[in-house]
Image (cartoon, rainbow, N blue to C red):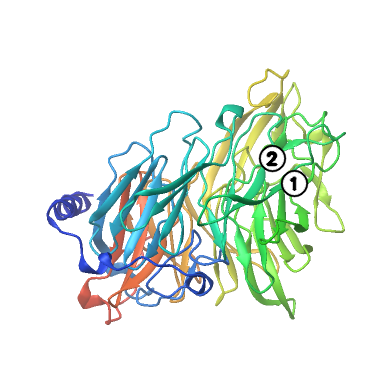
Amino acid sequence: MKLLKEALVLAAGALLTLGASPHSLRAQNLDSADLIKPPADSWPLYHGDYSGKRHSPLTQITPRNVSNLSLAWAFQTDQTASIKASPLLVDGVLYFTVPDNIWAVDARSGHMLWHFHHPTTQGDHIGQRGVAMYKGWLYFTSPDGHLISLNAKDGSVRWNKIIADVNKGYWTTMAPLVVANHVIIGVSGDFDNLTGYLRALDPDTGETQWQWNSTPPAGTPNTTTGGMTWMTGTYDPKLNLVYWGTGNPTPVLNGSTRPGDNLYTCSIVAINPDNGKLAWGFSVSPHDTHDWDAVETPMLVDGTFHGQPRKMLMQASRNGYFFVLDRTNGKSLLTVPYGPTNWTKGIDKDGHPIPNPDKEPAPDGRLIAPDEGGLTNYRAPSFDPKNGLFIVDAHPSYSIYFAKPADGNYGWAGADYGLWGKGVIEAIDYQTGKIRWSHEVGRGGSGAGVLTTESGVTFTGDAYGNFLALDTSDGKTLWHAGTGASIQSSPISYELDGRQYVLTGSGGVLFAWALPPASTHSPQKVARTP
């Protein structure tokens, strides 16, 4: 820890004395080709690319030399909010966020190029996931329901559009998704009578192109509201389909007023990005009564499944089940639990969990696994194609759910009290759903996302603020470093000037890690920590 503090002091001094790097003054211009096939010196989308796999092709940092990893630079935001964003990297410049704020930082030195602040008092400041970029423009959602377009060179505002009514209880936290000439955004909120939706806007003018609602129009009999679209989706350019997860129905814990499956809440949906039409939907938690949003990453993987070539979609969902779908039509290939789950009667013929009415919240309480936070949450998983592993930060847990008279507070009509939980990095064999290996990361869970690399290293965090490098083949610790605060972001990796960096946020600090120059081409002996 002492060495880390000394490094932070040196890095802080560098921030004060360094001028802007000439590399970072290049014209910022991100086109559709860069989004479809990102070069190694970029991370141009929230997930790195459209697939959501968060698997880096870089190989300079390996299981043999990762023990030499050291701090390249650190950037302090001076904000109380923790960094939950995945930075974008375009032309040597990093763009990252906390609520109401964007920074542009030189990716080689950590030197700040500009800072944008959008002061708000309305909306939930629960977190901010990042920005999107197209051509020379950035797109940023604010807690008060605005989408703001800024000049990537200097942070000046081009336009500011209202995308959700904060006075009704909406807010926005997500990183938009750019697909061709569409900027696609989702919304957040937990009050009754709010409908979740996706909206596409023109990247030049901010005008609405289409909107898809996750629930039927108000007043439709025997339906629900809800279905918020909290997190960034994925995209298949060949099928021309955007894939998105939707949130819980409302009232949240009281399902008596909304019979049926409550489509399309707690679902994975496939949407045509050109017109907003639904191609298919798959109900992950039919008739949810436990607040288990299905907004976790809808990861796209091409490969064989049980010997047949498939275009797959995989999701480790908050409700405790791992799903593999055929993403061309939404048909189930596999549904299995990846941790303790006790709320279902089993799986139906189409791969949907069957809710057990006896496990709905009740006045005398019901023991439920997992808890309200879910077996995983917003933190991003990763996919390693070499080992066929879907790797996720899981949270085995138990809680007691109570039903209470509706009090109008967020439409909950009940409460959840956590009893026990721990954090575990799990490597799931996507062919069978079996856990190939697991690595415990502490009581309560970590909140960090996962990044894998082609060389066989998995990066993530633990519950104690340590940044971890694990061996992707077996989950053993190869290296770790304390950061001084909880890690609530998902790592990214990029290569500039022949040097690979791994980046993560911890508290209000952005850390960049790299091998010392002498180590970048000389393999070292593996050094594992218990």
Q: Residues within 10 Å of mark 1 (few under 14, many from 20)?
A: many
Nearer the observer, 338 or 151: 151
Q: Is residue 346 visible?
A: yes
The percent position of residue 525, horizontal first and vertical second, equals: 31, 77
Q: Which residue is mark 2?
A: 248
Q: Residue at x 82, y 50 (%)?
A: 346
Q: Residue at x 75, y 63 (%)?
A: 334
Q: At label 1, which amino acid type do we have?
A: Ser
Picture coordinates of residue 332 (x, y %)? 78, 63
Q: Earlier in the sequence, mark 1 or mark 2?
A: 2
Q: Amino acid at mark 2?
A: Asn
- Evaluate whether residue 437 shows in this view: no
* Residue behind mark 1: 285
Instruction: Look at the numbered disc 1 and give the secondary structure of its residue.
Output: loop
Kindly indicate whether the residue at mark 2 contacts the one at mark 1 (C-beta within 8 angstroms).
yes
Q: Nearer the viewer, residue 404 or 260?
A: 260
Please state which of the two labelled residues, at mark 1 or mark 2, is closer to the viewer.
2
Taking 301 as reference, is 84 left or right? left
| Left or right position of 218 against 422 | right
Say few, some or many: other residues with alpha carbon within 10 Å of mark 2 (under 14 / 14 to 19 / 20 or more).
Answer: many
- In this rendering, position of residue 289 left or right of residue 439: right
Which residue is depicted at the point 67% across and 37% down? Answer: 291
